Image: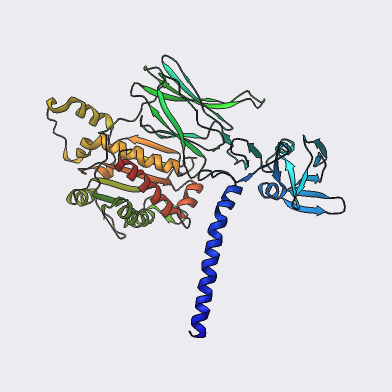
Amino acid sequence: MSVTSRGMAARMTALALLAALTAALAPLAAASGAPALPPGAPERAPVRRLDGQAYLGANDLARLLDATKFWRPDVRKLVLRAGSHRVTLAVDNPFVVVDERTFRLPAPVRSVRGELQAPVALLDSLPRDTTIARLLYDPGRGVVMCMPLSGVVRSPQLAAGDTLTRVVFPVDHVAEVGVASRARGHFRLRFGGAFVGASPESLSPGGLVTAIAPIPVAVGCAFELAVSPAAQGFRLVRDPGSAGAGGPRSITLEVSRFRIPGLEDFAPAGPPGPRALEVIVLDPGHGGDDRGVTVEGVAEKDLTLALARVLKPELERRLHAQVVLTRDDDRGLAQDRRAETANHARADLVLALHFDGAPGTGYAGASAWCPPALVGARREAAGRNAPVLLLPWREVALRHAVRSRAVAEAVLGALELAGAGPTRLREVLPHPLLGVNAPGILLECATLTAPADRARVTGPRGLQDLATAIADGLAAWERGR
């Protein structure tokens, strides 16, 4: 064997040993860490039990507080400096100094293998201003979490009556909640805060909510509920708590068996089961001399075309569908030409891509426009005995209104869960669907006049993340969810 061959063999042997050692240590590393939390969960650190008390390591405490550590070996004290605040811990001492105040902990600070361990009760002594991270101990998961600015959502509580079923979500901020899906089978609520509770162990018998579970989201947290077909509508009730007293805050979902004032409707239910998506037509809005919304050099016509080019391979890969673009360059197209392309391709779905703009307002997020589902629902309910209605050709999209509404719900729900909300659904036949003989929606993917939206979609992964969310929604609709 040559020197080179022997060297390569030795290197391969070393790599194999390293891989085996890594595999052997992986279970130990997983066992020593905190339980896995869903994507978008806050930063956290595991606690350990010492003599029956919950302790947090000083290194983890410093990381969560984004603090600098200063060790004083002469007096065996550790000083953590986080912004303008200072926390001083002393080995074998139950007293902790936070800024200029001294607090007694239920157990002394310990030193384990050279690292200080502080009782978790220390968290109650930390300042509550915005210059220092707010930490929360979750005994159920055995972790300390760095709470996001949007706060947390705690365990939902259910109560079922004869006419109303209430699901109460204790929250820190009552404003940050949105309905991501109105379908009875997959009703979804998204919150800005992180979920630190647990799902109910049992549901009230006879209630209108038959299941509830947290689901992964990019930002904050979300829950999916199954609602009984007997439910007629729902509403969200925000309780801001006691004024100025820091009282409990909550969001309550009320589901009613009867029609009462203030109820919102559930999404119309289309035919159950999966749908066939063999041909999808993407219609990038504007083009040529029509620039669309233009803000700080960002033109809508360029973004819609760029998004279509990113979304096309994403849909082909995940849905195995043929994807056709109405335009693949910077040209203007009349609506009749766009409809002709979709109809000639025998589209199973048409997605008109646009971006919104509302200068001088706080308007932000995404919107979907679809034909009014009420028209299609009435036609389907009438069945075969309904009189034949001759629709004007430009309004032929109305015959697909129920399925279009379901597509809009699915895509907006995926955008909401991906943190691209708030989302809105408009049931008006939009201009880009005139003459289109297929289910379809006009999707305003973001609001370019909103700085946060504009920065998100023009960032390095902005269009790819947007395409992924849209594909998530279409995949859910195709599966019949």
Q: Residue furthest front?
A: 1
Q: How far from the left and from the top, in percent, is residue 474? A: 33, 45
Report whether 268 appears left or right of 389. Answer: right
Report whether 295 appears left or right of 291. Answer: right
Q: How far from the left and from the top, in percent, is residue 79? A: 79, 49
Q: How far from the left and from the top, in percent, is residue 422? A: 45, 39
Q: Is residue 86 visible?
A: no
Q: Residue furthest right?
A: 74
Identify which residue is drawn at 35% across, 31% down. 185
Answer above or below: position of 323 versus 443: below
Q: Which of the 4 image quadrants contains residue 264?
A: top left
Report the number of discs.
0
Of 183 and 149, nearer the camera is 183
Q: Residue furthest bottom?
A: 2
Q: Quadrant of the C terminus?
A: top left
Of 365 and 248, nearer the camera is 248
Of 333 and 369, nearer the camera is 369
Q: Which of the 4 image quadrants contains residue 408?
A: top left
Q: How is the image coloured?
A: rainbow
Q: How far from the left and from the top, in percent, is residue 182? A: 38, 32
Q: Is residue 426 visible?
A: yes
